[in-house]
Image (spheres, grey):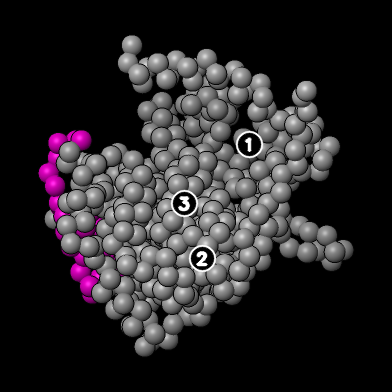
Amino acid sequence: MTKKEQLMNYAAKKKEMCIENDTISDNLFKEYGVNRGLRDVNGKGVLTGLTNISKILSFKEDENGGTVPCDGELWYRGYNVKTLIRSLGEHEFGFEKTAYLLMFGELPVAGDLEEFTQVLANVRTLPTNFTRDVIMKAPTKDIMNSMTRSILTLAAYDNRTDVATLENNIRQCIQLVAEFPMLAVYGYHAYNHYENDSSMYIHRPKPELSTAENFLRMLRPDSNYSELEAKVLDVALMLHMEHGGGNNSTFTTRVVTSAGSDTYSAIAAAMSSLKGPKHGGANIKVMEMMQDIRRHVKDWKDRDEVKAYLAQMLDGEVFDKKGLIYGMGHAVYSLSDPRERVFKAYVENLAVAKKREKEMNLYNLIEELAPELIAEKRHIFKGVSPNVDFYSGFVYEMLGIPMELYTPLFAIARIAGWSAHRLEEIVGMNKIIRPAYKSVMAEKE
């Protein structure tokens, strides 16, 4: 028996001890008035801070002073995200403009945007031989792990890693926003070459291209892409950049930042949070679910057949047998996810261009049938609607993006939001986050 097998056997023996001694009952949480997972019985997060960066609305006040569900709204720095996206020109990309808004609090005027995009272009590069010595050295299917390792290693190439001035933190955040697409795409190509025995492509980004354009250029063997493809990806990035501050990875950024840790450590910690399947992998589960539906439903237009299979899914009889229809409902939104509402028109345009209308119609049918079934079987009547993850995986698939890059794409977008929250934590809080835990330990003689 190997040492690794011995260790695994030992861990298996100790499993029951951990379960016995680490389980805390719901009754104790109720007794002490503590919210498990910092969420109340309705799933709403408890307040842990204040922010100027973004806002989510899912309920509005009625005439009696109570609250009623409303169509979801997402605001970045005082601007409705729908308005930001709809204000873009036909040939304009919005990721860079929105990153500027999130990080600095104001929409850039023409000169500001030109300067910011030039700064991003200038630092959209990696240290000499970094791709060879770091990214290609230990390829892995887990691109989030590859990126996190690269982020921490980049700290070794920065002779001002621990300089705590605000301007140095701004510089580091901008640099990571620029470098993230390279870390993700090069990490995938290294894995695809060494593990899948495919050809290696390392295309350098072009300074005149947007983040979305450069991502597609670096990913594809021929570097070609259409304007529609880049535009849809750009909108997807804008919709995933920030989400109210209360999500797990953003809170992680603020916790680590509050301890005085450097930018690389804070962002690496956020990456470790985002890669968790309960946080950043939702669109992957949707894609796996849709693949399962396509395999088992013979006629995608047959409402009764689709409905019957979805009912089996909710009953835990098919797919992963967890009784869930993935991509439906959201922990925060009630009537609708505003990101999905904006995104769907772009998804439909791309589906037409890619001749995938048949699958788009299946998505539409599931979007119609799933809420009815969930309300019927789960007795949830507050309103269940598709979230942005219901469609994002379909878009990435139509763009030819491999599933290994779905969560890294989320990170490429969210690094802008994390950076904004890091800067706000440094400027506006300046106090270490130290939560309290009530001990329910029994004393022993």
Residue 393 visible? The answer is yes
Q: Which amino acid does the dot numbered 2 rest on?
A: Arg
CA distance separating discs 1 and 3: 35 Å
Say if the magenta span includes residue 254. Answer: no
The residue positioned 60% from the left and 48% from the top of the image is 330
Q: Position of residue 346 (x, y in %)?
A: 40, 60
Q: Amino acid at mark 3?
A: Ala
**Residue shown at 41%/73% (left/top)?**
168
**Do the CB atoms of the residues marked 1 and 3 lie less than 8 Å apart?**
no
What residue would you read off at disc 2? 422
Mark 1 is surrounded, within 10 Å at the Cα level, by few (under 14), some (14 to 19) or many (20 or more) other residues, namely: many
Q: Mark 3 near mark 2, Cβ–Cβ under 8 Å?
A: no
User: Neighbour class for label 2 at 10 Å: few (<14), some, many (≥20)?
Assistant: many
When asked about the image quadrant of residue 129, the answer is: bottom left
Stretch in magenta:
195-221
The residue pinned by badge 3 equals 269
- Amino acid under label 1? Ile
Screen quadrant of the N terminus:
top left
Foreground: 350 or 389?
389
